[in-house]
């Protein structure tokens, strides 16, 4: 496997721009905005449309501390991963460097599907990818997502 791709947990991977989609990757969630994709295509990024993947989703977001995506965007990202995992697919979440945006999404997925709090989720992501470091705005968003998930769970009980 490409050494730039990190295993977070079974079936969940994280990276910056991959140059290939090796086994066992079956689905990719790309978080890069169009300007980054154009750069990546010129510099050897593996094109997901000719790579034989079973699933691909594009949810562009900037790595911007002051303009984080909303809770709806984050929930959509986690639902995509959750649905792919229910199909048994191994999922790669990637951004440009595999440090901030992909860490945000993978932490949120762990919170949603494994009941982790933000600190537990980040520790799990960092265990698989030590350079993981969501920006401060993303950390605040994870805390808000945690409150939302907790409130939903309380209402369902």
Image: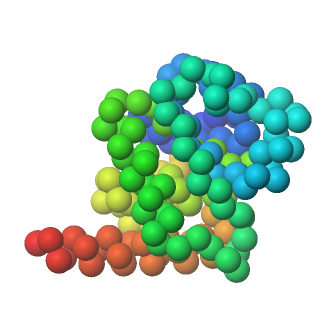
Outermost residue, left side: 157
x then y, percent, for residue 94: 63, 45
Q: Position of residue 146 (x, y in %)?
A: 39, 72
Which residue is found at the position 38% from the left and 60% from the top?
111
Q: Position of residue 67 (x, y in %)?
A: 67, 77
Render colour scheme: rainbow
Judge whether 78 appears above or below 41 on screen. below
Residue 92 is at least partly visible in this image: no
Question: Relative to 130, is 157 on the left or the right?
Answer: left
Q: In the image, what residue occupies the spot 88% across and 35% down?
A: 42
Examine the image and state in which quarter residue 39 appears.
Answer: top right
Is residue 88 visible from the viewing direction of this image?
yes
Q: In the figure, residue 45 lies in which quadrant?
A: top right
Between residue 97 and residue 58, name the one nearer to us: 58
Report the number of discs: 0
In the foreground, 75 or 15 = 75
Up the image or down, 144 lies above or below 11; here it is below
Which residue shows up at 63% across the image and 22% down it?
51
Q: Where is the N terminus found, in terms of image quarters? A: top right
**Residue under the image location 72 percent in, 28 percent down:** 46
Q: Nearer the viewer, residue 87 or 129?
A: 87
* Left/right of residue 30 with respect to residue 16 in the rendered view: left
18 w.r.t. 109: above or below: above
Q: Quadrant of the C terminus?
A: bottom left
Q: Position of residue 155 (x, y in %)?
A: 17, 77
Q: Is residue 133 left or right of residue 141?
A: right
């Amino acid at each position: 496997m490409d050494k730039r791709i990190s295993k977070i947990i079974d079936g969940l991977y994280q990276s910056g721009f991959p140059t290939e989609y090796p086994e066992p990757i079956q689905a990719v969630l790309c978080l890069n905005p169009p300007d980054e994709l154009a750069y990546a295509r010129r510099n050897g990024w593996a094109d997901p449309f000719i790579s034989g993947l079973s699933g691909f989703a594009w949810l562009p977001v900037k790595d911007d501390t002051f303009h984080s995506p909303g809770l709806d965007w984050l929930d959509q990202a986690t639902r995509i991963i959750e649905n792919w995992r229910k199909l048994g697919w191994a999922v790669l979440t990637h951004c440009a460097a595999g440090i901030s945006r992909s860490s945000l999404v993978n932490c949120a997925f762990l919170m949603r599907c494994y009941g982790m709090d933000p600190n537990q989720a980040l520790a799990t992501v960092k265990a698989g990818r030590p350079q993981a470091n969501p920006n401060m705005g993303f950390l605040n968003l994870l805390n808000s997502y945690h409150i939302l998930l907790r409130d939903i769970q309380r209402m369902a009980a």
